[in-house]
Image: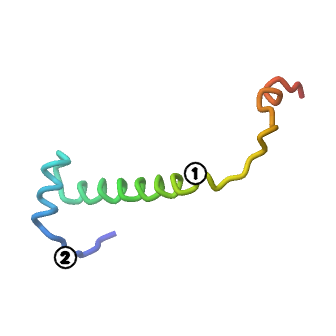
């Protein structure tokens, strides 16, 4: 898909240099993937401590369960 964006060229050039990639397109693609990964990780971190669990649950017993 072709998209025209007005980007800060100095930021884009710096990202290309730091990322070691050959093209602006590759740099933007990597940046978007990293952005998505970071936001998804933040969602997981925010979920810590919000799940209730049964402290009496014996997970080792489930391992030894014969079906």
**Element at badge 1?**
loop
**Does residue 31 appear to the left or right of 42 in the view shown?**
left
Q: Disc 1 marks which residue?
A: 48
**Does residue 38 appear to the left or right of 16 in the view shown?**
right
**Label number found at residue 6:** 2
Q: Are marks 2 and 1 in contact (CB under 8 Å)?
A: no
Residue 33 percent coordinates (x, y): 37, 55
Q: Quadrant of the C terminus?
A: top right
**Element at badge 2?**
loop
Q: Is residue 2 above or below residue 34?
A: below
Binning the other alpha carbons within 10 Å of mark 2 as few (below 14), some (14 to 19) or many (20 upward) gives few
Q: Which of the two residues, 41 or 17, is positioned nearer the viewer here?
A: 41
Q: Residue 2 appears in which quarter of the rendering? A: bottom left
Q: Which of the two residues, 22 or 65, is positioned nearer the viewer here?
A: 65
Q: How is the image coloured?
A: rainbow
Q: CA distance from mark 2 to mark 1?
A: 38 Å
């Amino acid at each position: 898909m072709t998209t025209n964006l007005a980007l800060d060229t100095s930021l884009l050039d710096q990202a290309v240099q730091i990322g070691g990639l050959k093209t602006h397109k590759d740099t933007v693609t990597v940046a978007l993937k990293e952005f998505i990964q970071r936001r998804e990780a933040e969602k997981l971190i925010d979920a810590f401590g919000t799940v209730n669990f049964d402290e009496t649950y014996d997970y080792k017993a489930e391992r030894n369960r014969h079906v």
